[in-house]
Amino acid sequence: MEGPAYIPGAPLLESPAVLPMRPDEPGDPLIVSGTVRSTSGEPLPGAILDIWQIDANCVYSGLTTEDFGGLDIPNDSTGIPKYNLRARIIADSDGHYEFRSVMPGAETLGIDKDGSPLAALTRALELPGMRPLHIHAIVSADGVHPLTTQIYFDGDPLLSGTIEGPIPQSAVKRTELHDDPADYQARGLSVPYRTLTYDYVLRPAA
């Protein structure tokens, strides 16, 4: 499911891309890359990855708490640009994509709000009131079914307590830290960054 945090119409960017972000965007830099292929193994040139995520301070851009309806997820995005950390990335002629973002924060479920059905369910299941760190994506291309999915992060203690059920192991990826000053400065960064590889596989349409 797209979920309530999705906003259509994010900026369309060629790969490699930098997600729209503030000059002082909090969070550790993260570079995500991979290939979009069909189930037969063929790359899908020009595939579009519609990416969105929460920021390091646990806020989705362009939304208010009311936009989450009965979920009662606290979200005050006042002063944050509508499409912050949101973009549609166009894969290259080999189906390869790359984008730079920041490590996401944890999504709070608003379990302290009296009368919230989500809060009652979370307490009944004895689960934490936060979702694991994740990055959303809707991946589409000509001739295949679109895929709506999420990237999760290896080592996140919240992975074992998700309210939506067990997370497929194939969606959990490990990041690699790059802390050589010559390396991150060559990328135009002033601090170390992390990389993550995630390949998407799409099923051909009938």
Image: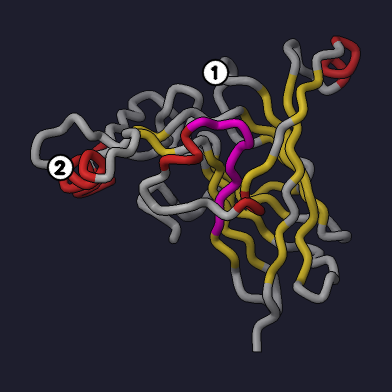
Locate residue 3 relative to residue 30 in the image: left or right.
left
Q: Does the magenta-highlighted stretch encompass residue 153?
A: yes
- Residue carrying label 1: 26
- Residue carrying label 2: 116
Q: Amino acid at mark 2?
A: Ser
Q: Residue furthest bottom?
A: 206
Q: Is residue 107 above or below residue 34?
A: above
Q: Quadrant of the C terminus?
A: bottom right
Locate residue 14 relative to residue 186 in the image: left or right.
left
- Please tell me whether mark 2 sits on a helix, a strand or a loop: loop
Q: Residue furthest left?
A: 115
Q: Quadrant of the N terminus?
A: bottom left
Nearer-the-camera pick, 170 or 104? 170
What residue lies at 62% left-to-right and 75% top-to-bottom?
A: 145
What residue lies at 27% left-to-right and 32% top-to-bottom?
A: 74
Nearer-the-camera pick, 150 or 66? 150
Locate residue 163 relative to residue 91 in the image: left or right.
left
Q: Residues within 10 Å of mark 1 (few under 14, many from 20)?
A: some
Rendering coords of residue 44 (x, y %): 79, 67
Q: Amino acid at mark 1?
A: Pro
Residue 74 visible at all = yes
User: Magenta span covers which residues?
Assistant: 149-157
Q: Earlier in the sequence, mark 1 or mark 2?
A: 1
